[in-house]
Amino acid sequence: MNHRTFTDREEAGWILVERLRGQPLHDPVVLAIPRGGVETGAAIARGLGCELDVVLARKLRAPHQPELALGAVSEDGDVSLNDFATALTDSGSAFIEAERQRQLAEIARRRTMFRAVRPQADVKGRTVILTDDGIATGATIIAAIHTVRAAGAKEIIVAVPVGATARIDAIRPLCDRVICLQEPEDFWAIGQFYRTFEQVEDERVVELLRDYGLPQARG
């Protein structure tokens, strides 16, 4: 199957900007999922002239298959599980709880680092544009949607460069709009849709939040 290959995460973000421009947005804020999604989110925030922040959700890794998500945990500790999660864990809830605690510890580490340069954005009554560099299982973005909804967002737009069709279909009912540039049938990994897909380090996220995270002047 033919599919589009993005130069990098930033280029993908600028293409999303073109899809977002002209849409009704109420005091928008971009919330990106660290770490790769922050490069995409920074481009969107620059293009729309709005602020950038992160949403700290983490996937729960399957035993012996760390790339497979059982679900995800949000910053407030709530867990969203995929249907197959229990079948893949020998010890059931005990494993999931242990993995939840591991990921909450990582969320706390990132919170300390990222909030030192960017206080958490107030999303109440605003349009929230949730982004990542792609959606494979959808677990993390679903956890992020629940978090943002609970925080009082006026509307939630999920804007991503690429996603697995089945997972995008599962996400649509949970938010107000989905903008996904491509949903290829031959999807197996997000990185296959980028020419450059290097790991994004914490220091890069801090840099982007410092440069683009502050609110822009709003009339």
Image (cartoon, helix red, strand yellow):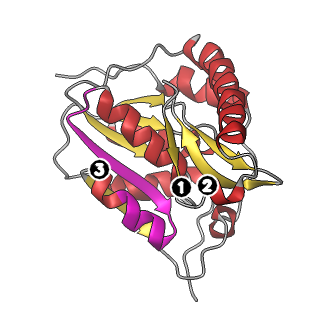
- Res. 142 in view: yes
Disc 3 residue type? Cys
Nearer the observer: mark 1 or 3; the answer is 1
Depth check, front residue: 118 or 59: 59
> Disc 2 on helix, strand or loop?
loop
What percent of the width, then of the height, locates residue 86? 62, 54
In primary-sequence order, the first of circles 1 and 3 is: 1
- Residue 46 seen in render: no
Residue 76 position in % (x across, y down): 48, 24
Q: Please give the residue where the numbered disc 2 appears in the rendered image.
A: 85
What's the residue at 69%, 19% (across, down)?
109
Distance between the Cα atoms at labels 2 and 3? 23 Å
| Above or below 169: residue 133 | above
Quarter of the picture containing the C terminus is top left
Asked if 187 appears above or below 63 in the picture, the reply is below
User: Where does label 1 land, which residue?
Assistant: 82
Q: Which residue is mark 3?
A: 175
